[in-house]
């Protein structure tokens, strides 16, 4: 699911800043690699730091001075979007009634 969050961030950078993916490809690749093993609850507290030559995932409260121009993308909004899209119907899903009564399919001990 972390890669989906990274994909949302890429779409946001492209649509909001008008940046070309090719200009940030190295940094974005590193973000995707890092996110592949991260869970959503951890990512929710993180930000992506992307430059043309590097990409990092850091806890948002650990970001200090940046040595070069960097795009900082907070992940919280994207994680919330992914969670809403994934679980939006789960509360409304009810078990459907069977058109026939349940019956045992096997008897005896296994």
Image (cartoon, rainbow, N blue to C red):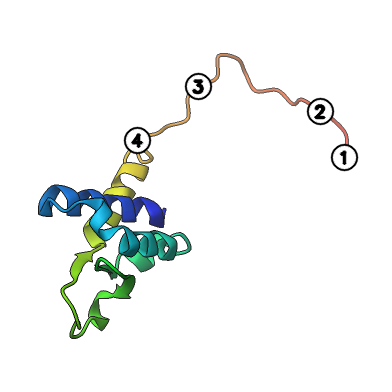
Q: Nearer the viewer, mark 3 or mark 4?
A: 4
Q: CA distance from mark 3 to mark 1?
A: 29 Å
Q: CA distance from mark 3 to mark 4?
A: 15 Å
- Which of the 4 quarters of the picture holds residue 66? bottom left
Q: CA distance from mark 2 to mark 3?
A: 22 Å
Q: Position of residue 81 (x, y in %)?
A: 26, 49
- Which of the 4 quarters of the picture holds residue 30? bottom left
Q: Position of residue 109 (x, y in %)?
A: 88, 39
Q: Position of residue 6 (x, y in %)?
A: 32, 56
Q: Which mark is residue 92?
A: 4
Which sits earlier in the primary sequence, circle 3 or circle 1? Answer: 3
Which sits earlier in the primary sequence, circle 2 or circle 4? Answer: 4
Q: Which residue is mark 2?
A: 106
Q: CA distance from mark 2 to mark 1?
A: 9 Å
Q: Which mark is residue 97?
A: 3
- Residue placed farthest to the right in the image? 109
Give the structural element (helix, strand or loop) at label 2.
loop
Q: Which residue is mark 1?
A: 110
Tell me, yes or no, whether the two marked residues, 2 and 1, touch with CB atoms within 8 Å: yes
- Mark count: 4
Which sits earlier in the primary sequence, circle 3 or circle 4? Answer: 4
Q: CA distance from mark 1 to mark 4?
A: 36 Å
């Amino acid at each position: 699911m972390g890669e989906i969050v990274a994909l949302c961030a890429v779409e946001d950078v492209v649509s909001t800043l008008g940046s070309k993916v090719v200009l940030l490809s190295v940094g974005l690749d590193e973000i995707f690699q890092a996110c592949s093993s991260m869970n959503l609850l951890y990512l929710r507290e993180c930000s992506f730091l992307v430059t043309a030559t590097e990409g990092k995932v850091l806890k948002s409260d650990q970001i200090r001075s940046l040595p070069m121009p960097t795009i900082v993308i907070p992940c919280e909004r994207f994680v919330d979007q992914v969670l809403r899209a994934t679980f939006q119907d789960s509360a409304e899903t009810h078990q459907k009634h069977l058109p026939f009564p349940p019956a045992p399919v096997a008897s005896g001990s296994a």
